[in-house]
Image (spheres, rainbow, N blue to C red):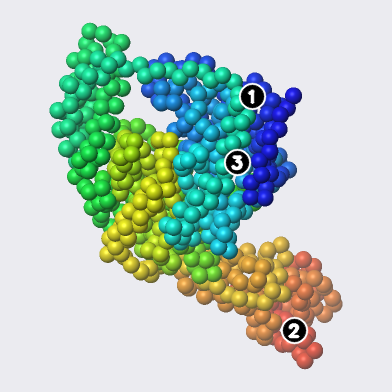
């Protein structure tokens, strides 16, 4: 028998239905709000996977086309691989759940979130996260929940739940929390201040409190007994041997600032400890390796918390050395190289016509177009690895989306700058925060390409080391500080405010005080980076001569039909003759994308001639619509025809009109007279050897 629970939140009712759907899963629930319904099922292997030294968690977010009453596009007519948007939604659910599992739990676990019904204005990803946490709470799977999430916007000075998806408002915040701590934040902002962001987080955390109560109540009512959590299996003697034998060399290794040399030294030390401790008992090898990883983490964390000293000798709030270069590449329309410490991003910017916009099919907007794209690539060589590149994974898609979100707020409108814009960030070196380097290189590349962005944007990644009441907030974290630390908090913005942020943590959550300190420290670092960037370029350059040229014309709406012509014949002939692309807006604004100004001017002349009233001297390629004894009537424009007398059909005498022209033939004719009644007289004879000056 099904069981229903309802939670009222900000004027909306969220319904949870149990014991009805997917009952063979370890835990399942149907979560509904408005017309959006999300089915969540969680399953875990009953035994841990042997030999794993990590937690194998998988989160799938699946959007069904039937959820909005549509049939999938393409030939297959069924859902295929996840879209980038679905991949991003899966990450939003995965990131806050992952730190809530016991550290020793190694059972393969899969969370499947399926959107089975969708109504705009009721966020499916929020319901998916709520459902995932609730399903885990009532299952046998060990889980340190509950977790709740919300999408928050900012409208007319007030924070609101579930702003419309697909619309770029003042704020679009996805947040996940435990009862007293923030787990995950991801947001796009329209130059909001640090205090406004903190207030949004407070609003979300206070608003979602009823979800915690409901999950704890339903767990008490129908929750299954939890599987026992595996104990820490490291033998105390192994831990002590690793610390004793490796301490001096570990301390020496962490004085090496060069990443690859430090990694090589630590790897050699790890092999040495294995040979010393486990030479006679191979079963101890995994324990030695895990104990050594713990020793590395403990040493670095204490070095920062106690000595206030970082691996590379920087102060806690210090940014690594920065260098900026623009115009690095020869043929792209704009390019820049941004280097910060051992992290380097090469940005290449391409300008294109509106025809090159990205088309996407999603639940909330159907077929949508995007004129600004940022693609992030992380080739293996950027971290010194010898392996082949594959198609972008979740990490690449997520990092690229964050950088695109940060820069989208400063992109000029289509009326101000009529190009489609694509940025590709090639990460050439990585030692922490390559996504933030992509934001910086993207800004520099756009300025080099001549794009009049509103303001330069920079990004910085903040870290955290926390042990009980002691903590240290780190600016511009390196790879080790990210891997061995407790937080990765990326903040992007201009001098005037935040444009995007993303926070993930590995501990049970952080307080408002720590977040406020991290945001303040991030602002200081962001301003420092902007100062460095502006020494390379501070104003948009001229648009590259290699970029297509975009020109605009305004015509009357009733002339659009004349320009397009029957079946698009007129506009196709203009593009074929001049080599340009033409985009016509319903308002009558025409965008011409031309390889050069000469082609554009030729196209402008042809367009003006096509939409203007016929003039004496113009040459048309017309179509014969009627044949009479003394001549032919030729349509020179849709609905406009003229008479070509038999004496004007050819240079020589014509005995019979049919010898020269039949209905449907195309003839080159010139307007020789327009009488007071507007009747047009044409001459084929005078047009022979000429090219059309007007297409019809």
Q: Is residue 658 left or right of residue 168?
A: right
The residue singled out by tag 2 in the image is 681
Q: Nearer the viewer, residue 435 or 577?
A: 435
Horizontal arrangement in the rendering, residue 326 relative to residue 599 (left or right):
left
Give percent across and percent down for residue 140.
56, 21
Q: Earlier in the sequence, mark 3 or mark 2?
A: 3
Mark nearer the viewer, 1 or 2: 1
Image x and y of residue 160, in percent: 59, 54
Residue shown at the point (80%, 71%) measured from the top left = 625
Marks 3 and 2 in Cβ contact (< 8 Å): no
Tell us which disc is closer to us: 3 or 2: 3
Direction from residue 57 to residue 558 in the image, left or right: right
Determine whether label 1 and label 2 are within 8 Å by CB: no
Residue 337 figure quarter: bottom left
Regarding mark 3 in the picture, which secondary structure is present there? helix
- Locate the N terminus by quadrant: top right
Q: As drawn, is 126 to the left or to the right of 462?
A: right
Q: Is residue 626 visible?
A: yes
Residue 242 location, x and y as percent?
22, 21
**Location of residue 577 with respect to 460 vertically, above or below:** below
Give the residue displayed 59% in from the left and 39% down from the top. Answer: 211
Q: Between marks 1 and 2, how big is the CA–CA gap?
A: 90 Å
Q: Residue furthest right?
A: 629
Q: Secondary structure at mark 1?
A: helix
Earlier residue among tags 3 and 1: 3
Q: Residues within 10 Å of mark 1 (few under 14, many from 20)?
A: some
Q: Gap between marks 3 and 2, in whole Å? A: 82 Å
Residue highlighted by disc 1: 222
Between 143 and 273, the one lying in front of the other is 143
Residue holding disc 3: 210
Are there few (<14), some (14-19), or many (20+) residues within 10 Å of tag 2?
A: many
């Amino acid at each position: 028998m099904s069981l229903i629970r309802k939670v009222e939140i900000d004027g909306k009712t969220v319904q949870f239905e149990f014991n009805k759907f997917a009952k063979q899963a370890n835990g399942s629930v149907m979560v509904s709000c408005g017309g959006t319904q999300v089915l969540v099922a969680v399953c875990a292997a009953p035994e841990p996977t042997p030999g794993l030294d990590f937690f194998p968690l998988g989160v799938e977010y699946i959007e069904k086309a039937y959820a909005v009453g549509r049939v999938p596009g393409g030939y297959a007519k069924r859902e295929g691989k996840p879209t980038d948007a679905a991949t991003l939604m899966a990450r939003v659910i995965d990131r806050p759940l992952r730190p809530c599992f016991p550290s020793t739990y190694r059972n393969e676990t899969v969370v499947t979130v399926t959107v089975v019904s969708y109504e705009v204005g009721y966020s499916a990803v929020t319901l998916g996260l709520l459902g995932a946490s609730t399903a885990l709470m009532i299952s046998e799977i060990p889980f340190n929940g509950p977790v709740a999430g919300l999408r928050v916007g900012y409208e007319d000075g007030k924070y609101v739940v579930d702003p419309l998806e697909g619309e770029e408002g003042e704020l679009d915040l996805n947040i996940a929390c435990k009862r007293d701590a923030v787990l995950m934040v991801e947001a796009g902002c329209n130059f909001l201040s640090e205090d406004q962001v903190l207030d949004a987080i407070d609003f979300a955390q206070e608003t979602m409190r009823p979800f915690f109560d409901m999950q704890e109540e339903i767990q008490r009512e129908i929750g299954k007994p939890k599987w026992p959590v595996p104990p820490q299996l490291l033998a105390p003697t192994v831990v002590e041997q690793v610390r004793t034998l490796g301490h001096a060399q570990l301390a020496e290794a962490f004085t090496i600032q060069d990443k690859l040399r430090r990694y090589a030294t630590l790897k050699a030390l790890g092999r040495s400890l294995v040979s010393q401790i486990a030479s006679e008992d191979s079963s101890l090898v995994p324990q030695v390796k895990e104990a050594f990883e713990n020793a590395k983490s403990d040493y670095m964390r204490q070095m920062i918390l106690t000595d206030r000293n970082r691996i590379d000798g920087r102060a806690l709030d210090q940014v690594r050395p920065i260098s900026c270069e623009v115009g690095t590449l020869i043929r792209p329309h704009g390019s820049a190289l941004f280097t910060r410490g051992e992290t380097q991003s090469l940005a290449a910017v391409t300008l294109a016509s509106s025809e090159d916009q990205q088309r996407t099919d999603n639940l909330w907007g159907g077929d949508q177009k995007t004129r600004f794209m940022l693609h992030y690539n992380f080739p293996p060589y950027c971290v010194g690895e010898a392996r082949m590149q594959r198609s972008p994974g979740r990490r690449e898609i997520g990092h690229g989306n964050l950088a695109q979100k940060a820069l989208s707020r400063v992109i000029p409108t289509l009326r101000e700058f009529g190009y489609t814009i694509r940025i590709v960030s090639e990460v050439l070196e990585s030692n922490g925060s390559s996504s933030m380097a992509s934001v910086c290189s993207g800004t520099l590349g756009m300025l080099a390409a001549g794009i009049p962005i509103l303001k330069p944007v920079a990004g910085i990644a903040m870290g955290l080391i926390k042990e009980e009441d002691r903590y240290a907030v780190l600016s511009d974290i390196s790879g080790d500080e990210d891997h061995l630390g407790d937080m990765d908090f990326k903040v992007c913005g201009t001098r005037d405010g935040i444009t995007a942020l993303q926070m993930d943590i590995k501990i049970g959550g952080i307080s408002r005080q720590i977040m406020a300190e991290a945001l303040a420290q991030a602002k200081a670092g962001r301003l420092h980076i902007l100062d460095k960037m502006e020494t390379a370029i501070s104003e948009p350059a001229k648009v590259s001569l290699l970029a297509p040229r975009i020109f605009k014309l305004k015509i009357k709406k009733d002339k659009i039909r004349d320009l397009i012509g029957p079946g698009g014949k007129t506009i196709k002939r203009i593009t074929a003759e001049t080599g340009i692309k033409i985009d016509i807006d319903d308002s009558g604004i025409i965008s011409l994308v031309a390889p050069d100004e000469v082609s554009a001017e030729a196209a402008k002349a042809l367009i003006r001639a096509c939409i203007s009233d016929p003039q004496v001297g113009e040459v048309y390629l017309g179509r014969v619509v009627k044949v009479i004894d003394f001549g032919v009537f030729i349509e020179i424009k849709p609905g406009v025809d003229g008479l070509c007398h038999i004496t004007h059909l050819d240079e020589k005498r014509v005995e019979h009109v049919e010898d020269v022209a039949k209905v449907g033939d195309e003839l080159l004719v010139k307007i020789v007279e327009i009488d007071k009644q507007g009747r047009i007289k044409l001459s084929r004879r005078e047009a022979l050897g000429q090219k059309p000056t007007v297409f019809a």
